[in-house]
Amino acid sequence: MKIGVVGLGYVGLPLAVAFCDAGHEVTGVDTDPRVVEALSAGHSHVEDVPDESLQAIGSSLRVTTRYADLAKVDAIIVAVPTPLTRNREPDLQPLIASGTALAGVLQQGQLVVLESTTYPGTTRDRFVPLLEESGLAAGRDFHAAFSPERIDPGRTDFTLRNTPKVVGGLTDECLRQAVSLYREVCDEIVEVSTPEAAELTKLLENVFRSVNIALVNELAILCDRMGIDIWEVTDAAATKPYGFMRFEPGPGMGGHCLPVDPFYLSWRAREFDMTAEFIELAGKVNQNMPYHCVAKIERVLNDAAKPVRGSRIAVIGVSYKAGVGDIRESPALKILGVLAGLGADVVYHDPHVPDLNELGLAAASYDDALDGADLAVIVTAHPEVDHDVIVDRAPLVLDLRGITRRGSADRSAVLL
């Protein structure tokens, strides 16, 4: 098969490589010429796709900025960003631009699958009409489907191959075509009746996590006031063999999915005269966690008779999750920004993030970050960082991830 992939980010690039590994020819389209130039030279900007994997597929993957090159492929997968506006409403501009461009090259018999996370109805009501500007009719002249991405950056136990793939087609034939496509790279396909069901499936997955993380985060704030160890409570609750699923508190949610996707659903709910109060409250709680963490930092310093202004605060880990360098929506960025605004001398160490240009910061070495620090704050617990040494070396340590609870350090850190 000849396959086109639009959007060569953390979703699209692994997809393109997987289809190449399965023996197919892939044309990758990205509007960023820097991405195209780097990929053409065999250099990957996605951590889950090492340069060696990219170079191994050779000429099977051809990357370009030209949508016109998709006219000769059999199937096109669209994996463009779906962010939020400043007002926390869906921003479909990348998707609209992609659909408009595809309408100019769409051919009879082609399959177009949208993977970008979005609200129910987007594929049918927004994306397909753009494609039909080509003069072709969906379900008759070309096939359309939605299949939500399930990429978890940095994860190796569940990959594209062994993670079940949900697919919903505009028609039965659209579904059949999409299922046939994904069987090339996925072991299990989950067929649903409509694109809307597939779109909502993805949102339910992420809303579920958002709501439960918000619950335990709110309990963490309450436990802080009550003088109860939230980690001890979650450990004890997790011993129940049924009816409980463990979620852990933290400084807030990051990545593209959890801080963004629930707001797509709550926005859509308002169009049906319903306020998704549960979802919006969870978002509010999680968005406020970085501010709670800053307040905790202020109290830890205050207990040591130190002000925030002028104190050297070392933030350990700034990516949104352990083991990766992805900083999208990372709560560490908000924490660093607020601390800097309060006059703190902030420095950070993260082996995966060399610089934070938007904050004007560059990563310090492990030793340089701890030298002279009044307080070390563990925001993201990377596995290659020795957190016990941090507890022993820094005069004060605030652990927002609970990573030091079972450590071997002689001293103990203050927990979230």
Image: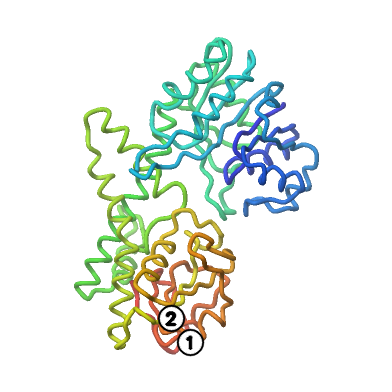
SS of the residue under disc 2? strand
Name the residue that disc number 1 marks. 372
Q: Tell me the quarter of the picture where residue 240 sits.
A: bottom left
- Residue at 30%, 76% in the rendered image: 298
Asked whether disc 2 touches disc 1, contact meaning CB atoms under 8 Å apart, the reply is yes
Which numbered disc, 2 or 1, marks the residue that appears first in the sequence?
2
| Crowd around label 2: few <14 · some 14–19 · many ≥20 (10 Å) | many
Q: Tell me the quarter of the picture where residue 411 sits.
A: bottom left
Question: Residue 387 location in percent, x, y?
Answer: 49, 78
Give left or right: position of 9 versus 322.
right
Q: CA distance from mark 2 to mark 1?
A: 7 Å
Q: Tell me the quarter of the picture where residue 384 sits.
A: bottom right
- Residue at 23%, 69% in the rendered image: 223
Q: Is residue 312 placed above or below 116 in the rendered structure? A: below
Depth check: give the residue in front, 149 or 292: 292
Depth check: give the residue in front, 288 or 169: 288
Give left or right: position of 314 versus 248.
right
Name the quadrant of the C terminus. Answer: bottom left
Amino acid type of the residue that numbered disc 2 sits on in the rendered structure: Arg
Depth check: give the residue in front, 212 or 32: 32
Question: Residue 162 location in percent, x, y?
Answer: 58, 43
Question: Residue 233 location in percent, x, y?
Answer: 28, 68
Q: Is residue 113 placed above or below 134 in the rendered structure? A: below
Name the residue that disc number 2 marks. 312
Name the quadrant of the N terminus. Answer: top right
Amino acid type of the residue that numbered disc 1 sits on in the rendered structure: Gly
